[in-house]
Image (tube, grey):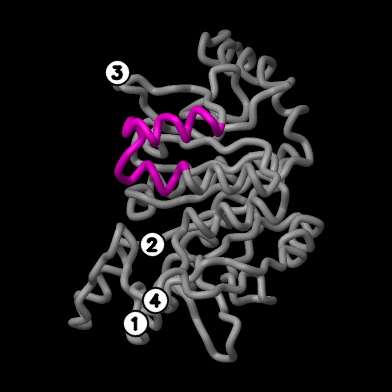
Amino acid sequence: MKTRTMNRDWIATARTLSEALPYLQRYAGAIVVVKFGGNAMGDGDAMAEFARDIVLMRQVGVNPVVVHGGGPMINDLLGRLGIESRFVRGKRVTDQATVEVVEMVLTGLVNKRIVQAIMDEGGRAVGLSGKDDDLMVCEPDDPELGFVGRPVEMNVQVLRDLFDAGIIPVVAPVATGMQPGETFNVNGDTAAGAIAGALKADRLLLLTDVQGVKNAAGEVVTELTPDEVRRMTDEGVIAGGMIPKTETALKAIEDGVRGVVIIDGRVPNACLLELFTEHGSGSLIRAARA
């Protein structure tokens, strides 16, 4: 004869699911673009946890798009090939030899690892780059940077087609150019912002290795308006590597994204905490409510 003992963990799990219901309803059918990068990409357990969260998002009716980087893997292969890496204002100077390595690593090694991780967790995923179906067409961002691109044309119908088929798109930030045969390396945050803007996404989640945007006292600010971001930048409170992320956020909001969240990707289940709990996670940037 079987007996059942009510475990407090089970009760807590049931309560959590119940409390998540309004948020599950809120995001049903929503488009959420997630920029994935940082240390988690090289950690098998962290990768599996991220993939599980993405699959769960899709399972409850969210349409997620994963956009990834791959800087450490690119650096590793460039080093082994004897190709020197050089950066200007935080962006990789990309000559012809470098862009070939970037494309090889991002569209091959990194992209397929993420696709496989999602499929291992029971999801359906397809890997593609900005070159596929002219998803992302770029112009040179800065002549000093070489083949580093700035998106100027977006064709996101291929992503909508994948949503309709129940498939999670995983996008490598490599793009085509205006001229035949051109290939551009695109900053991962920039690519995620451009895709989110073109899709008019409900949320853009930028996973980072920091807790979020901090004020002058070093405290994480949980919600900001674009004007507050600009003021904090002018005052030097937002500085360094946070500036490109907040610039991406402001451009995405200008293009029609309802909100951008800068999240500490090191926190377990960070995406789920942001979308499906009252507490949220990180710093939400969105236009001021009327």
Nearer-N-terminus badge (3/1): 1
Residue linked to disc 3: 217
**Label 3 sits on what residue type?**
Ala
Q: Is residue 240 magenta?
A: yes
Residue linked to disc 2: 70
**Label 4 sits on what residue type?**
Pro
| Vertical order, 165 against 83 (above or below) | above
Q: Position of residue 215 (x, y in %)?
A: 36, 23
Depth check, front residue: 248 or 19: 248
Q: Given this view, does label 4 or label 1 mark the residue nearer the observer?
A: 4
| Vertical order, 197 against 288 (above or below) | below
Name the image quarter holding residue 265: top left
Element carrying mark 4? helix
Depth check, front residue: 255 or 107: 255
Nearer-N-terminus badge (2/3): 2
Q: Determine which of the numbered discs, if any, sits on residue 95 in the image.
A: 1
Q: How many marks?
A: 4
Seen at 37% across and 48% down, the residue is: 40
Q: CA distance from mark 4 to mark 3?
A: 38 Å
Element carrying mark 1? loop
Q: Badge 2, how many Cα within 10 Å: few under 14, some, many 20+?
A: many
Give, as a single range, the part of the protein colored magenta.
Answer: 226-246
Q: Given this view, does label 1 or label 2 mark the residue nearer the observer?
A: 1
Residue linked to disc 4: 143
